[in-house]
Image: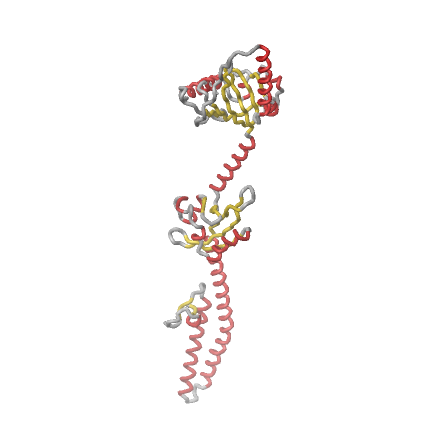
Amino acid sequence: MDEKSGEKQEQDMPSGSDFSSTMRIEIPPDLLDQGQQRVPETTRLRIRPQTPKTARLKAAEQADSKYSQLLQSIYDAAIITDIEGHIIDSNVRASEFLQFTHSEFNGQSIIDIISGSDGSLLKTLCQNLQNEKFALLQAYCLRKDQTFFPAEIAVNALKFEQMLLCFFIRDVTLRKKAEEMLRTEHNAIQNAGNGIAIADVSAKVEYANPAFLQMWGLERPEDIIGKDIRSLISDQTTAEMVGKVLEERESWSGEMQAKRADGQDFYAQVSMACNRDSDGEIVGMVFSFDDISDRKQAEEALRQSERQRVMLASVGAACHHLGQPATVIMTNLELIKRLTKDAGKPELEEIIQLTNEAAESLAGVLHKLNAVNEYRTIQYLDTKDSKSPTNIILDI
């Protein structure tokens, strides 16, 4: 903490005995904004009448004993310094945190323990604690082995014959790790490609990430918060599974159909599981949605392609099997025509001619079928039951 930072804090801090608050200071990595909150006024020291010397010594010993017991019983590491930061006293907890013995603290400065601090920090603390303010520092403390740990440090003034500073140091390593983990998990959920939603035990949406909003075509979280998530699911079976998962306290996954805000249908892979608190009690549900509309379309296209292939193969096989008999029929008709040419029976010649034309027509159809490269169907008759299988024929 440099002199400029200290001067800025002095200017920003309000003055006057009628203003009492908690000053917050964060040192590394950066000096953060200072927040303030009111605290009750502390009771000032009262001047008591003089007592006999022996009684005063006994009272002092008792007070010192109570002071030592109180200091050692404090949960946080407690370090008492003068206004220049020289350490005067400490408790056992301070030795555990900072790895110094009680005697090794003597002669050290609190500036050497609070990483990144300097004289301007003590100057700022003393000026602001004149009005019975409490200061809260977010900083890193330096141990004897030169390792660091994140700490929350509360500072207040002890106004005896001379002003002393009392630093209460709390190791917040676990809290920092938990906060970082929560921040990481939150960022992961916010930036996830899957749509993620959290609902309470009545299936009312409490949280939805950006991917969820985009999947349903929603603009703001407020458009879905508080609504029943089942209202977004078109598939009745999937909607019923929401209540079943809560009742049976199990997870479930499957495919479903849903409708976007603009009315467009889409398909999604959904996974749902119970959300539990730290005591294992169910407090709601967690949903994960993956838009599989493209996959569904690809699967449908693949099915259509396979259907086309099978049908075209069937048509090809039919043409092959019908082609040979058709050739035999046409050859035989030509032979019959030659043998009966001089028979003098016009009716027979006409029948042979019609049969030959039919055979040639059959040959033409077979030729067209062999040339088909796309299986399409058309209606055979214009009837009311136009979708009947008996009214559908191959378009050639």
Furthest-bottom residue in this view:
344
Q: Residue at 42%, 55% (x, y): give it.
A: 265
Q: Say whether residue 42 is visible.
A: yes
Residue 160 placed where, x, y %?
A: 51, 15
Residue 41 placed where, x, y %?
A: 45, 23
Question: In the picture shown, does residue 305 fall above or below 347?
Answer: above
Horizontal side of 162 relative to 57 (left or right) equals left
Name the one closer to the observer, 337 or 233.
Answer: 233
Q: Residue at 46%, 85% (x, y): give it.
A: 339
Question: In the picture shown, does residue 176 fall above or below 329?
Answer: above
Q: Say whether residue 196 is visible.
A: no
Question: In the picture shown, does residue 8 fall above or below 206?
Answer: above
Residue 210 placed where, x, y %?
A: 44, 43
Numbered-mark total = 0
Name the one closer to the observer, 172 or 51.
Answer: 51
Q: Quadrant of residue 365?
A: bottom left
Name the one closer to the observer, 355 or 242.
Answer: 242
Q: Residue at 57%, 18% (x, y): give it.
A: 63
Residue 157 placed where, x, y %?
A: 49, 19
Q: Residue at 55%, 12% (x, y): give it.
A: 51
Q: Quadrant of residue 35?
A: top left
The quarter of the rendered structure image containing the C terminus is bottom left
Colour logic? secondary structure
Name the one closer to the observer, 73 or 271.
Answer: 73
